[in-house]
Image: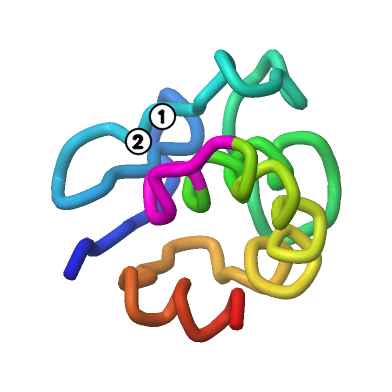
Amino acid sequence: MKVYEGGRSLDGAVVTVDGVELNPRFDLKRFSPAGFEWTYEGDGPRQLALALLADHLGNGAQALALTEKFMRDVVAELDNAWVLTSDEIEVAIR
């Protein structure tokens, strides 16, 4: 089971998967030039939703198809510092 963690540092928003920086997946789509954000609906949270889904699913096309709903239902609702497991992501997309 993977563990995704997000928090804020002096350098801005930081998101890791199992302790390693999460790839923003700009290769799939660049929603936000500034990278990840959360707690609201917008381009930064959309980029985070895409990155989380792409990492979890291992399928870029499927991640893109689910990004908008996942951003609204999950990423926009995250606290300032948060932890999500792959099991929780799976429940959210079912």
Q: Give 19 or 14, whichever is nearer the viewer.
A: 19
Q: Give 61 or 36, whichever is nearer the viewer.
A: 61
Q: For the residue marked with disc 2, what is the amino acid? A: Leu
Distance from the alpha carbon under mark 2 to that under mark 1 = 18 Å
Q: Which residue is mark 1?
A: 10
Question: Cβ–Cβ below 8 Å for labels 2 and 1?
Answer: no
Which residue shows up at 49% across the image and 30% down it?
12
Magenta part of the protein: which range?
A: 54-60
Q: Secondary structure at mark 2?
A: loop
Which residue shows up at 39% across the image and 55% down it?
56
Q: For the residue marked with disc 1, what is the amino acid? A: Leu
Which residue shows up at 17% across the image and 70% down it?
1
Labelled disc at residue 22 = 2
Q: Is residue 7 left or right of residue 62?
A: left
Position of the C terminus by quadrant = bottom right
Which residue shows up at 56% across the image and 70% down it?
79
Residue 88, image x and y in percent? 42, 80
Dot 1 crowding, Cα within 10 Å, few <14, some 14–19, many 20+? few
Choose top left, top right, bottom left or bottom right for residue 55: top left
Question: Which of label 2 and label 1 is nearer to you?
Answer: 2
| Above or below: residue 44 compared with residue 87 | above
Q: Give 42 or 31, whichever is nearer the viewer.
A: 31
- The numbered mark, 2 or 1, whose residue comes first in the sequence reads 1
